[in-house]
Amino acid sequence: MKRSVLLYLLFAAPAVHAHDVRQLGAHVHGQATVDLAIDQGRLELALQAPGIGILDFERPPANAGEQAALDSALAALKRADWLTLPSAAQCTPLHRDAHAEGFAAAAATPATAAGKHAHAGFTAELSYQCANPAALRVLVLSLPKAFPNLHEVIVNTATPAGQGRTVLSADNLRVVLAP
Ligand SMILES: [Zn+2]
């Protein structure tokens, strides 16, 4: 996954990189990770999610129904209506993108041949420019509601005021940023 410069800079501290989230195979089923950085009115978010969590399989779609589920999940991730920013912050989307990795037939082959479970997952990258970033105090990430198989979403936040970590579940969708 391509990481933005802002996310790279603000998450440079080793503590946040307990494991390399870019590597498929290091994920926990049902658990997604979000890195969220805000600086100078620019908000950037990178999501890493396992296939099992967004969908209920991690292999090439076996039929039209599974392909439709995959397409629909990608569209939902990219639409980003699972992220609610305070309207007072006046944020405008600059970029929203989502990718599926490991669901193509060819990509699944090497790990399967080695006798290991082949993982697959999703990434999404969002960026916004906010005219009033001071209003960015509480964000709502409704990923566990949008994707009920996603039991836990770990959100690492970084702002010039400091870093934070919030674990979201269906009962708690709020991320409170360091003041
Ligand atoms: Zn997996």
Image (cartoon, rainbow, N blue to C red):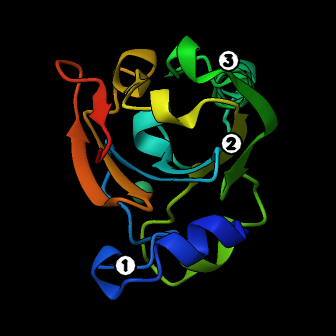
Q: Which residue is mark 3?
A: 65
Q: Residue 172 location in percent, x, y?
A: 20, 23
- Classify mark 3: helix, strand or loop: helix
Mark 3 residue type = Gly
| Mark 3, other Cα within 10 Å: few <14 / some 14–19 / many ≥20 | few
Point out the tag, 1 or 2, that comes first from the N-terminus: 1
Q: Nearer the viewer, residue 17 or 75?
A: 17
Q: Residue 39 location in percent, x, y?
A: 58, 55
Mark 1 residue type = His
Residue at 73 percent across and 38 percent down: it is 129
**Residue extending furthest toward the left:** 171
Mark 2 residue type = Leu
| 164 to 62, vertically: above or below | below
Mark 1 vs mark 3, CA separation in Å: 36 Å
Q: Which residue is mark 2?
A: 126
Q: Which residue is mark 1?
A: 17
Mark 1 vs mark 2, CA separation in Å: 20 Å
Q: Is residue 31 left or right of residue 56?
A: left
Q: Is residue 120 left or right of residue 155?
A: right
Mark 3 vs mark 2, CA separation in Å: 28 Å
Q: Nearer the viewer, residue 154 or 113?
A: 154
Residue at 38 percent across and 62 percent down: it is 27
Residue 22 visible in the picture:
no
Residue 104 location, quadrant: bottom right
In which quadrant will I find the C terminus? top left
